[in-house]
Amino acid sequence: MSQGSPATNRTFGTAEVAALSTVVALTVMNMTLIVPVIPAFADEFEVTLAAAAALVSVFAAGRLLFRFWGGVAADRFGARRVAILATLVVAAGAFVAAVAAEFWMLLVSRAVQGVGVAALGVAANQYLLVMTPRHRLGRATALFQTGIVAGAAVGPFLGGVLADLGDLRTPFWAQVVMGVAIVPVILLTIRDVSPEDRTVRESLRVAATMLRRPVFLGVMAMGFSLFFLRAGARNALLPAYADIEVGLSATAIGAVVSASSLTSVAAMIPTGRMVDKVGRRPVALAGAFAVAGSVALYALAGSLATLLLVSAVAGLTVGMASIPLATMVGDLAPEGTEGIAAGVFRMANDGGWIVGPLVLGSLADSGEWTLGFLVAGVPLVVAGLAFFRAPETRDA
């Protein structure tokens, strides 16, 4: 451990976490400004649907491949430096997209932004884990995650408004400007901390040691399964089901999807308090089984009202399930390795985010709606059953 590391004197209070959450909300909002225009922007280059889908894939690949290295960089150079550089990388990717004359330039820009998003997310998470006292890590994680969800909810709407006021490239230009504007906010919010003098080989050794711990593997399996369900059921299966089987309009489908996000935010702060008071493991298990059960209910919903109700309940359970897992990562990370731990955990989440829509989307194509909503929760149930043997990490 480096001398003078704040991990030995964690004094991060609610005000500091709220400031960090605001930075995260702004950066996530900025990253998602371009979501509504990506399909239409691809159409402008007259490419196939498969090529347009590659815009999502290369972004996800860039994010997945750089999660671990973003954590290594945060431990090695400090979250402040990594967050600033990552924000500028996202802005640079937006600039390339805004001036793109060829489709390959758009692909490159999305890959670059995936790398920036990965590093920024892990750096902010690492800083939270380094600075927060363990007895209040659940509440801090809940507030931090609230910023992520809030930014993701506002960004696409604001991006659509900007595109309507200008053109398809306007959200990219706005992303460039806002990316630069966020840098001084990061400077004011994230303090310099003593970096770890660790080589790449040593970082890989640390990651290998973490992966040999059954409890850490269990947390990763739960994270993968939760994101498999979230991305697959909400992003792939639910919109298709609401359109084809229930016959909802695009606006109504958007309301159904948004309902889960809103209730998820509402559940996070109370769950954070519960995680600190009751323990990480029982809340994680209760949330996992509740999520699987609530998502299965979508298959019984045949109207807008019932879909809204089920979506609201599912959102509450997702909020309940997500907080203890991220908190346990902080519990299990030895001092000075918080970035590596966060990076490895987020790689597992990204894996579920990529695989879920592929698996459940194929079931949507074949019209297997009931099976799809049941399958969505199977990995989480299996991971939860295995997690019954995991120890409590709150006082570890």
Image (cartoon, rainbow, N blue to C red):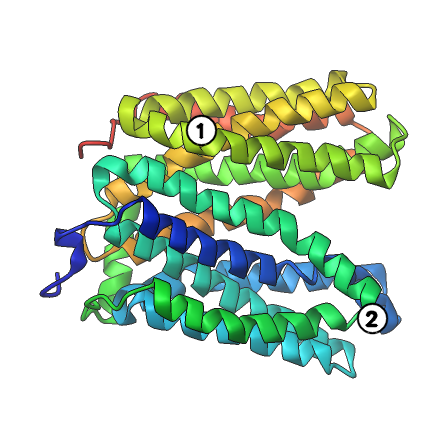
Q: Which mark is residue 88?
A: none
Q: Is residue 385 visible?
A: yes
Which residue ends up furthest to the front in the rendered image?
A: 15
Crowding around mark 1 (Cα neighbors within 10 Å: few <14, some 14 to 19, many 20+) is: many
Q: Which residue is drawn at 23% across and 71% down?
A: 199
Residue 185 placement (x, y as % from top left) = 43, 67
**What amino acid is labelled 2 in the image?**
Asp
Q: Between residues 259 and 214, which one lies in front from this camera angle?
A: 259
| Label tally | 2
Comes first in the chain, label 2 or label 1: 2
Mark 2: secondary structure: loop
Rounded to the nearest angstrom, the CA distance separating label 2 from label 1 is 45 Å
Secondary structure, mark 1, is helix
Q: Is residue 131 left or right of residue 306?
A: left
Q: Circle 1 is placed at which residue position?
A: 383
Residue 271 locus on image (x, y percent) = 41, 28
Q: In which quarter of the image is the C terminus?
A: top left
Residue 329, given in percent of the width and then of the height, sits at 32, 43
The residue type indicated by label 1 comes to Ala
On-image quarter of the N terminus: bottom left
Residue 153 falls left or right of residue 159: left
Hey, which quadrant is residue 242 in on the image? top right
Residue at coordinates 61% horizontally, 37% vertically from top-left? 261
Identified at 50% across, 68% down, the residue is: 116
Q: Is residue 223 above or below residue 93?
A: above
Q: Does the rendering let one see residue 200?
A: no
Q: Does the residue at mark 2 contact the one at mark 1 (Cβ under 8 Å)? A: no
**Closer to the camera: disc 2 or disc 1?**
2
Q: x, y (%) of residue 30?
A: 59, 62
178 or 218, nearer to the observer: 178
Read off the residue under disc 2. Answer: 167
